[in-house]
Image (cartoon, rainbow, N blue to C red):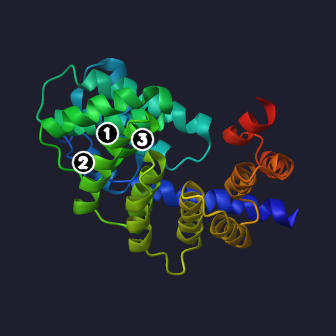
Amino acid sequence: MKKKIFIAAAIVIGLLFFFIGLQNRTVHLPFADEGVSYSEMWEKKQYAQIIEYGGTVLEKNPMDRNALIFVGYSYFFQGISILDMEERNSCMEKAVVLLRRALLTEGKENADVMYVLGKAYYHMGFYYCDLAVKYLDAALKKGCDSKDIYEYLGLAYSKLDMSDHAVENFEKSLEVNPSDILILTLAQEYIKAGNMEKAGYYLDKAGSGDNAVLKEKSLLLKGQRYLGLKEYDKALESFSRVLEINPGSADAYYYTGEVYEARGDLQKARAQWRKAYNLNPEHYKSKLKLFK
């Protein structure tokens, strides 16, 4: 029971860290509607109240620009803090519908509408990443200067396996909005692209301090890099250290299995993949190894 609680807590902390890192409220807002101050509610983060009031406005006028934008933004920021995938996707889908409709109206906020729309598409998952790229790129061309736009573009390109574009945008993001998690993300992309020299450079550059989530990610990436360099003992040491921090890391068990497979010991490899699968039955790579 304690182990399950520890694993659940680690997952929650990791997700919170990720979504907090991507949350950015530097969007330009339209003028407040008569009779209610959307801006005041927005500053207080009263997203539910905006959705409720804006919904009544949209019932009377489905193309009310202020309501479309404010309610669309509110669904996005309400959704980004929700860990449950189904609930979050529901919020993002509503945000997309409203913001797509807002783009049919005229106004100077279109660049920021496209920016939030692109982010919403990214959070809807892999099959919407091409649309995330489309609207984020359009927002950039219209002058959107939000600090995390290049990071989102990098993440979307990464999911689309377009490593060159992902790296280009992560490096631009690092110039305007540097962070250790972004440095590690860039290292991860270079590992994915097979550039272990660049990956090593960024892994050495990243700091973790006392942050357990960053330390775990850094060690996991170092292990993957050692695996790519065929330095198997160092890879095993890195993955073992990950498991000391987080015994519930399915990734650490999976990549330990990769090391044993590379050494020709398939029996040990499958035992590690089984541990990963037992910890997380949705661990895609382990499922492929065990059931292909």
Q: Is residue 227 visible?
A: yes
List the residue tagged with mark 2: 27
* Mark 2 burial class by Cα count in 10 Å: few <14, some 14-19, many 20+: some
List the residue tagged with mark 1: 116
Q: Earlier in the sequence, mark 1 or mark 2?
A: 2
Measuring 70% from the left and 55% from the top, which residue is drawn there?
259
Q: CA distance from mark 3 to mark 2?
A: 24 Å
- Please tell me whether mark 1 sits on a helix, a strand or a loop: helix
Measuring 80% from the left and 37% from the top, which residue is drawn there?
290
Callout 1–callout 2 Cβ contact below 8 Å? yes
List the residue tagged with mark 3: 158
Quarter of the rendering containing residue 66: top left
Disc 3 residue type? Ser
Q: Pick whichever, 185 or 177, lies toward us.
A: 185
Q: Earlier in the sequence, mark 3 or mark 2?
A: 2
Disc 1 residue type? Val
Q: Pick whichever, 155 or 76, lies toward us.
A: 155
Measuring 62% from the left and 43% from the top, which residue is drawn there?
84
Question: Does residue 21 appear to the left or right of 33 in the view shown?
Answer: right
Please state, as top left, top right, bottom left or bottom right, where the N terminus lies in the image: bottom right
Disc 2 residue type? Val
- Please tell me whether mark 2 sits on a helix, a strand or a loop: loop
- Please tell me whether mark 3 sits on a helix, a strand or a loop: helix
Q: Earlier in the sequence, mark 1 or mark 3?
A: 1
Quarter of the rendering containing residue 205: bottom left
Q: CA distance from mark 1 to mark 2?
A: 8 Å
Question: Does residue 279 appear to the left or right of 70 in the view shown?
Answer: right
